[in-house]
Amino acid sequence: MNIPEDLKYTEEHEWVRVLDGNRVEVGITDFAQAELSDIVYVELPEAGREVRRGEAVATLEAVKTVAEVYSPLSGRVVEVNTALEEAPERINQDPYGEGWIFRMEITHPEELENLLTPEQYRKIVENA
């Protein structure tokens, strides 16, 4: 199970990469993409959308199920990975790279402290 040490995580299996200042990149973890299996469709959030921590912002459709992606932080979506519309399988192939889902500008940086460390997230998936 790939759990990069330079990211933060949520119990809902999203990851967060701090890019610079208040900008972050969000995707789903290797564990989540493996559980979903073959992702065939992605409904992305709209750029400019204001979101609150815990709000459903994107939908992933796999061969056998549908899953929501929740915003790990409060802020505004500033960019979405439109390449996923044509190639949603990028999430399965490279969840921490080409498979990122959206980038946002966070409004409450202190919320980063509520995210899980790699070690905390590892314990969650080991008990799943």
Image (tube, rainbow, N blue to C red):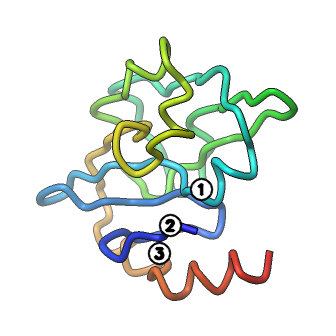
In terms of secondary structure, where does tag 3 sit? loop
Kind of residue at badge 3: Leu
In terms of secondary structure, where does tag 2 sit? loop
Instruction: Determine whether 77 is above or below 86 in the image.
Output: below
Kind of residue at badge 1: Gly
* Image location of residue 110, percent across then percent down: 32, 75
The residue wearing badge 2 is 2
Q: Earlier in the sequence, mark 3 or mark 1?
A: 1
Q: Is residue 96 left or right of residue 116?
A: left
The residue wearing badge 3 is 115
- Closest to the observer: 82 or 75? 82
* Image location of residue 88, percent across then percent down: 54, 24
The residue wearing badge 1 is 54
Residue at x 21%, y 51% (from the top left corner): 23
Instruction: Determine whether 59 is above or below 113 in the image.
Output: above
Measured in 3D between alpha carbons, the distance from the residue under mark 3 to the one under mark 1, in whole angstroms, is: 12 Å
* Image location of residue 105, percent across then percent down: 26, 47
In terms of secondary structure, where does tag 1 sit? loop
Mark 3 vs mark 1: in front: 3
Q: Earlier in the sequence, mark 2 or mark 1?
A: 2
Measured in 3D between alpha carbons, the distance from the residue under mark 2 to the one under mark 1, in whole angstroms, is: 24 Å
